Amino acid sequence: MPHLHMEYTDNLPGLNADVALLRFNHALAGSGQFADEFDIKSRAVQVGAFRVGTGMGERGFVAVRLAILSGRSPAIKKQLSDSLLAVLQDVCEWPAGVEVQLCVEVLDIDRESYTKTAIGR
Amino acid sequence: MPHLHMEYTDNLPGLNADVALLRFNHALAGSGQFADEFDIKSRAVQVGAFRVGTGMGERGFVAVRLAILSGRSPAIKKQLSDSLLAVLQDVCEWPAGVEVQLCVEVLDIDRESYTKTAIGR
Amino acid sequence: MPHLHMEYTDNLPGLNADVALLRFNHALAGSGQFADEFDIKSRAVQVGAFRVGTGMGERGFVAVRLAILSGRSPAIKKQLSDSLLAVLQDVCEWPAGVEVQLCVEVLDIDRESYTKTAIGR
């Protein structure tokens, strides 16, 4: 942990997922919340089948989920969420004519049952 | 929020993901639980690598997850879940000879650390 | 339920997702925690866009999430997590020169709002 997931709709050609993930990871490493940068595992998935609401007009979204081991305070979670949203707002030239929603969620991983190991390190 | 995810196995040729998502969104908008239809963000992912149980025979599933901001009552969550399952049961001509499981989960998004913004609106 | 998700980065050519899922399912069926093997629904997604940390060097990960209906004890969750990690460690010839993180998370599904049905059974 932490684990970061980014989902983005396929009508955002200006969004470079690799660049976004690297910038998220730097923001997380810089937060001081995670002892080892190596632990930050981020991935992005482009979403081809999606629907925003019921209205017409072109719409899209980028949804980021950050999963961290349980125990951090609400204030720290909010801080992490704000910092990721700030990166997201800055990372892309958003297309004209598309209503794009950006959102960041922080969720807990159950600490007691989380297991992991590393190979080749 | 709300965020809806639909995963469906790739042995269900009769399932039209776009139609399913639009019908889910209409059900959610009609529930009266969400102030703005624009907030409903749904996506579908077809799953090519999957395994149901350990037995033989062709099996598949459709798994829907609805994530909503924390604070709603268990009764409302159950209602939302039931209404999405009803849509799902009705949305597809299921293939003969495949045992298909349909399921709907409702989960909370931590309200305090959820951040979002909209661009181009 | 249970639902199992495996995400794996695309730099692990030795990982056979189908084999891994079948072995996970056998481990879960053998745990005695689930009444019917048919209920175990597992899927795998290969992740092409990912970033581990901020450092250089080739890195990858396999992240398994097991979602089960709420109510099981921490000890049972830990046991399930350990048994899945054991399968994961054993299921692949890991590539030389890649630092690979393996992790398993167990999370609860809200029992009250979970709905499901089966077709063709």
Image (cartoon, coloured by chain):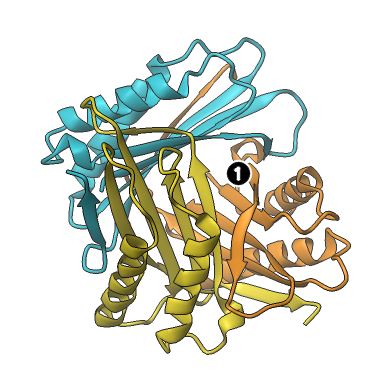
Chain colours: A yellow, B cyan, C orange
Locate residue C14 relative to residue B28 in the image: left or right.
right
User: In terms of image quadrants, where is residue B108?
Assistant: bottom left
Residue A61 in view (yes/no): yes
In the rendered image, which residue does mark 1 sit on? C35
Q: Residue at x 26, y 74 (%)?
A: A78
| Neighbourhood count class around disc 1 (C-alpha, 10 Å): few under 14, some 14–19, many 20 upward | few
Chain on which label 1 sits: C
Asked where in the image residue A68 lies, by quadrant, the reply is: bottom left
Q: Give coordinates of residue A85: x percent, y percent.
A: 31, 65
Locate residue A80, reporting x and y percent.
Answer: 34, 75
| Whether residue A110 is visible | no
Taking A87 as reference, is C34 left or right?
Answer: right
Residue C90 picture quarter = bottom right
Residue A37 sits above or below residue B27 on the image: below
Amino acid type of the residue tagged 1 in the rendering = Ala
Residue A43 higher or lower than A61, as above or below = below
Point out residue A31 in the picture as x, y percentages from the top left corner.
Answer: 40, 85
Horizontal side of residue B102 vs B28, given as left or right: right
Q: How many numbered discs?
A: 1
- Residue at image position (18%, 57%) is B71
Task: Estimate the x, y position of residue C63 in percent, counting from the top left.
Answer: 63, 61
Placement of A14 over or under A117, stated as above or below = above
Q: Depth check: C36 or B24 in front?
A: B24
**Looking at the figure, which quarter contains the C terminus of chain C?**
top right
The correct choice, above or below, for C15 with respect to B112 in the image is: above
Label 1: state its secondary structure: loop
Residue situated in front as seen by the camera: A48 or B43: A48
